[in-house]
Image (cartoon, grey):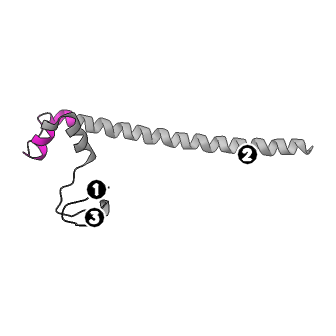
Amino acid sequence: MFLLPGRAGKVGPMARDSSAPVITASEIGQHAYCARSWWLGRVKGYAPANVADLEAGRRGHEQHGRLVRHARRWQYLAYALLSLALVVAVVAIGLLARGG
């Protein structure tokens, strides 16, 4: 847990003060990769020079996300069909065991 400024005694995400700055997970990653780059963007307000590359990366991540969601839907369908096949097999074995 963490203690946020401006909220004495309040701990955790629900204690967020609206005036307190929010640092995102991507900013933490950026800081871990290059603290100077994070500082220049966050503190000094400089925009990155490679905006086109960043946009291409964003589009690539969106496309990958769509592919993953699509694959997950097919996976759920496969699990459903496999479950149905198992139920049919159990019923068939039960009927054959009873002689029917």
Q: Are marks 2 and 3 in contact (CB under 8 Å)?
A: no
Residue extent of the magenta highlight: 37-54
Q: Secondary structure at mark 2?
A: helix
Q: Secondary structure at mark 3?
A: helix
In the picture, measured across the screen, residue 25 lies left or right of residue 78, that is: left
Question: Which of the labelled discs sits on residue 87, or is there none?
Answer: 2
> What is the three-letter code of the residue carrying label 1?
Phe
Q: Identify the residue under disc 3.
A: 15
Q: Identify the residue under disc 1.
A: 2
> What is the three-letter code of the residue carrying label 2?
Val
> What is the three-letter code of the residue carrying label 3?
Ala
Mark 2–mark 1 Cα distance, whole angstroms, equals 50 Å
The spot of residue 84 in percent (x, y) is: 68, 45
Q: Quadrant of the C terminus?
A: top right
The spot of residue 56 in percent (x, y) is: 24, 34
Sequence order check, earlier mark of 1 and 3: 1
